[in-house]
Image (cartoon, grey):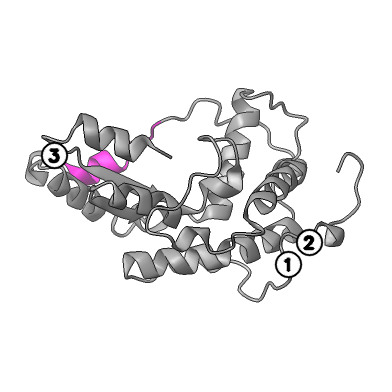
Amino acid sequence: AEAPRRMFEYCSTALPKIIALLREPIARYESQFQMRIRLKTRGYTSKSAADADMRRDVHAFCGVTKHHATWYLHPKPTGLFEPARNGVYEGVYVAHLKRWRHAGFTVHTLFFEEFFSDERQADHLRDVLRYIGLDPTKMDAHAASRRKYNTKGADFDYLPRHTFSSFAQRRLAVLFRPYNDGLAAFLGRPLPDAWARWPNATGDACDESAWPRRPGW
């Protein structure tokens, strides 16, 4: 949570240019889980289950925020968890971006779904090059945007338990909704259509009594 402040103090004479690439938070969370079981990091294995992992994170997140529901509206929201320790918290982008702005940084914010769209991927890459001070005419942006990176383990066999159930996705949609609305207001522009997952989902995402009863939960 204090990384923006420390970086500003260290780089105050020549601030680095920060780029934030934001993915729809439910998809980002599921991707993080699948990466961990594929690489077997942080104790995850192929036997880990996405819904059970998410329920633990929701329980921890709701336990911290239940009496401070508007914490993210503060100009410098409090850091709630250590980096990469809670998948729900990682997806509350508005809180993270506010801390960078509060520290004095300008953040060039991109949406994953738009950046990797086939129609405009090269255009988005050129915009990034301009932002960091490079001449986009010196690179074949179209060819660069078609290259594949970080594909190690892409042939991993995912099982049904490695994806969120529709029930879990609806719960996350309800939980993330106010934070996504806050992000749109903070950025001053609408979120991509792909972010409107389960728009009719309702209920209290923190009410664990409504969760299905399954072994190990």
Badge 2: residue crowd in 10 Å (few <14, some 14–19, many ≥20):
few
The quarter in which the N terminus is drawn is top left
Q: Position of residue 130 (x, y in %)?
A: 13, 48
The picture quadrant where one finds residue 4 is top left
Which of discs 2 and 3 lies nearer the camera? The answer is: 2
What residue is disc 3 on?
139
Q: Is residue 12 left or right of residue 59?
A: left
- On screen, 129 above or below 176? above
- Residue 207, label in figure: 2
Q: Position of residue 90 (x, y in %)?
A: 52, 45
Question: N-terminal of the two: label 2 or label 3?
Answer: 3
| Residue drawn 11% across the image and 45% down it | 136
Amino acid type for the residue under numbered disc 1: Asp
Look at the numbered disc 1 and give the secondary structure of its residue.
loop
The answer to whether residue 55 is visible is yes
What residue is disc 1 on?
204
Q: Is residue 108 left or right of residue 117?
A: left
The quarter in which the C terminus is drawn is top right
- On screen, 94 above or below 57? below
Q: Is residue 42 left or right of residue 210?
A: left
Give how far apart the Cα atoms at labels 2 and 3 are: 51 Å
Asked if the residue at tag 2 contacts the one at tag 1, i.e. Cβ–Cβ closer than 8 Å, the answer is yes
- On screen, 50 above or below 213? above
Q: Position of residue 107 (x, y in %)?
A: 27, 50
Give the magenta range.
140-149
Look at the numbered disc 2 and give the secondary structure of its residue.
loop
